Structure formats: structure tokens, C-alpha cells
Amino acid sequence: MAATSRGTPPVPPDARPRLTVLSGPSGVGKSTVVAHLRKEHPEVWLSVSATTRRPRPGERDGVQYFFVTDDEFDKLVANGELLEWAEFAGHRYGTPRGAVLRRLEAGDPVLLEIDLQGARLVRESMPDARLVFLAPPSWDELVRRLTGRGTESAEVIERRLQAARVELAAESEFDVTLVNTSVEHVARELLALVDVV
Ligand SMILES: Nc1ncnc2c1ncn2[C@@H]1O[C@H](COP(=O)(O)OP(=O)(O)OP(=O)(O)O)[C@@H](O)[C@H]1O
Ligand SMILES: Nc1nc2c(ncn2[C@@H]2O[C@H](COP(=O)(O)O)[C@@H](O)[C@H]2O)c(=O)[nH]1
């Protein structure tokens, strides 16, 4: 089945912003879609966030995240090294400022995969950023995906689903919504928005 999109259509190429923020509820498929996109288009640069969460099996420091201690995260905040940061389901996550700004200055398309709070902060500090919301085909499918991933305890899944209700209610704040029915389709739609084609 094809992915569908809602919201503002892409603006003409010469007016496209080069910073794209992808948000959406936990388990909707953000990382899966971005990994698919970057497999075919490695030129799309994805910011690697810092987090105080522990790595999941298979996750490597500096690849999925920079895994840091609470003290290290405090220092990143105190030194102004984060473009934005937020607490999500009991852990802190933040976007390293320096790397993002260097990429943007170089004219490279930049993609952030962050939560709703982070998206709102980026909108305030960088109003030209394009905010993309990844929505699930249905609530039941979101629960299936988050549970089926098998990486979180029942308690953590419950916290993430509570956050998901808030995030889904904020869809209208985003410039574009992509519905993740098909990873391939939605990755193609995201690529068009990220402005590298
Ligand atoms: N279109 C899809 N159809 C079916 N399953 C999907 C689809 N997209 C992703 N999934 C599956 O859903 C699960 C959650 O995906 P993923 O980890 O990418 O979500 P996420 O939005 O990055 O979550 P989080 O915010 O918690 O990091 C994974 O098991 C993934 O394989
Ligand atoms: N505000 C920010 N949110 C971020 C950042 N990096 C990731 N995230 C979001 O956190 C949740 C949970 O991620 P998980 O890897 O523990 O499942 C998810 O919505 C991510 O998009 C960030 O730098 N800032």
C-alpha cells in the first residue's frame, strides 16, 4: 500500500529549506525510514544526537547516538553545545549544535530525527526549518510496531504511548505529514522534502 501525505505540499526547489526535522511518535518508524533513505542516499546527513539512555543491543556509540552519562549531558547543556534538548520517557536527548551548523554552512542538507519538544525548539531558533511529522496508519498499528520491536519493557512502552498521544495531537504544528504505511514510499517522499534530488 502506498504512503500518503497530508499538509502543505513541497515548495519550489529554489525556496526549499535545507534543515529538515523528522518527528513522530515512538515506534512509528522514523529510524527505519531514515535508514532506508540513507542507504540509497548517503549524502543526506543525519545528525547524531547525544542521549543519557543506555544503548539497545546492536547500537554503537557515535553511530545511532553518542551515549553519555548524566554529568556529561549536564556539561553539554551548560556549555551551550546543544541546539536543542528534551527529556523523553525518562531520558535526555539533544542535538549537537556544532556539527549541524557546520553542515548547514557547507550547504549540505541536514536531517534531524527528534521528538515533538525538540521540533518546537528548532522551529523557534531556526524558523526556516521544515518540520515533517511521521504518522502511523492507525493507533493499533503504532502499538503493534512499538511492542513488536521488543526493545522496551511494558512500563517503558506505556510511557512512550502516553507521549505518543500528545505527539499525535500536535500533528497540525508540522509543515507536512507523511503516513508510514510503506517504508519505501515514505522514504521517497521524505527524500523529496530533504532537497537532494
Ligand atoms: N512501514 C512499516 N510497516 C511495518 N513495520 C514498520 C514500518 N516502519 C517501521 N516498522 C517497524 O516498526 C518498529 C519501530 O520502528 P522504528 O524503531 O524505526 O521507530 P521510531 O519511530 O524510530 O521509534 P523511536 O522513536 O522509539 O526510536 C520497528 O520494528 C520497524 O521495523
Ligand atoms: N528532542 C530530541 N529528541 C530526540 C533526539 N534524538 C532522539 N530523539 C527522540 O527521542 C525519542 C526516543 O528515542 P529512542 O531512540 O530512545 O527510541 C524519539 O522520539 C527520538 O526521535 C534529540 O537530539 N533531541
Image (cartoon, rainbow, N blue to C red):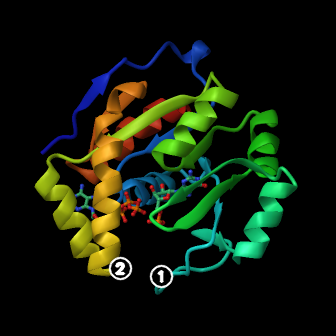
**Type of amino acid under label 1:** Arg
Coordinates of residue 84 in the picture (x, y in percent): 67, 46
Coordinates of residue 121 in the picture (x, y in percent): 61, 37
Callout 2 secondary element: loop
In front here: 59 or 182?
59
| 105 w.r.t. 156: above or below | above
Other residues around mark 1 within 10 Å, as few (<14) / some (14–19) / many (≥20): few
Q: Which residue is mark 1?
A: 56
Residue labelled 1 has its Cβ within 8 Å of some atom of ligand 2: yes
* Residue located 35% across and 73% down the image: 156
Tell me which numbered mark, 1 or 2, is placed earlier along the sequence.
1
**Type of amino acid under label 2:** Thr
In front here: 124 or 155?
155
Q: Which mark identifies residue 112?
A: none
* Residue 2, image quadrant: top left
Residue labelled 2 has its Cβ within 8 Å of some atom of ligand 2: yes
- Report whether 176 appears left or right of 110: left
Q: How many marks?
A: 2
Marks 2 and 1: in contact by CB < 8 Å? yes
* Residue located 64% across and 60% down the image: 49
Q: Which residue is mark 2?
A: 151
